[in-house]
Amino acid sequence: MKNNLSIVLLMGIALSTTSCASMFTGTKDKITFNSSPEGAKVFHKGVEKCITPCTAEISRALSKQTVTFEKEGFNTKEVKLTKTFNPVTLLNILFGGAIGVGIDAATGSLTKYSPKKYDVELEAQSSELK
């Protein structure tokens, strides 16, 4: 009985230490957006996040992520969010193994957004399009 309890306890500890990047750095990043001129709406996945200048939480994902800036009288501008490897993920190799890496991959925590600030220059629409 004690042996079974020990095994269950060890499995619980092992599972609780998996997905280190998700646990320690979360699944979202706060990113600051600025535009010239100010007052542009910032959209991520079709959802308005904020109006510049602003900071918004953007969910991490392994797939390509973009934000769109929209302001009346100006051309819409799409910006790709760049990412870097999240070094906290390396803890999974030591402690969490494949399960932890899989969880971090599913939550997007294998990467993090970098830079955390985007400055965008919006171009005025030509007078024909106004």
Image: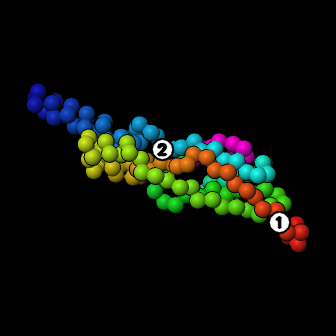
Q: How many marks?
A: 2
Image quarter where the N terminus lies is top left
Residue indicated by mark 1 = 125
Instruction: From the viewer's side, name the closer residue of 57 and 52.
Output: 52
Kind of residue indicated by mark 1: Gln
Could you tell me how far apart the alpha carbons at marks 1 and 2 are, in whole angstroms?
Answer: 37 Å
Q: What element carries label 1?
A: loop
> Which image quarter: residue 76?
bottom right
x and y percentages locating residue 77 in the rendered image: 70, 61
* 1 or 2: tag closer to the N-terminus: 2
Residue assigned mark 2: 27
Q: Quadrant of the C terminus?
A: bottom right
Q: Percent x, y for residue 18?
A: 31, 41
Eyeballing the image, is 56 above or below 78?
above
Q: Residue drawn 13% across and 33% down?
A: 4
For the question of whether residue 94 can be seen, the reply is yes
Residue 80 in which image quadrant: bottom right
What amino acid does circle 2 point to? Thr
Q: In this view, does 126 lie above or below 52?
A: below
| Secondary element at image label 2 | loop
Magenta stretch? Answer: 50-58
The location of residue 16, given as percent across then percent down, is: 31, 36
In front of the other: 64 or 83:
83
Residue 36 placement, left or right of 21: right
Answer few, some or many: residues within 10 Å of disc 2's Cα (few below 14, many 20 plus, some between 14 and 19).
Answer: many
The residue that appears at 52% across and 61% down in the rendered structure is 64
Identify the residue shown where x is 41% and y is 47%: 86
Left or right: 40, with 29 as reference point: right
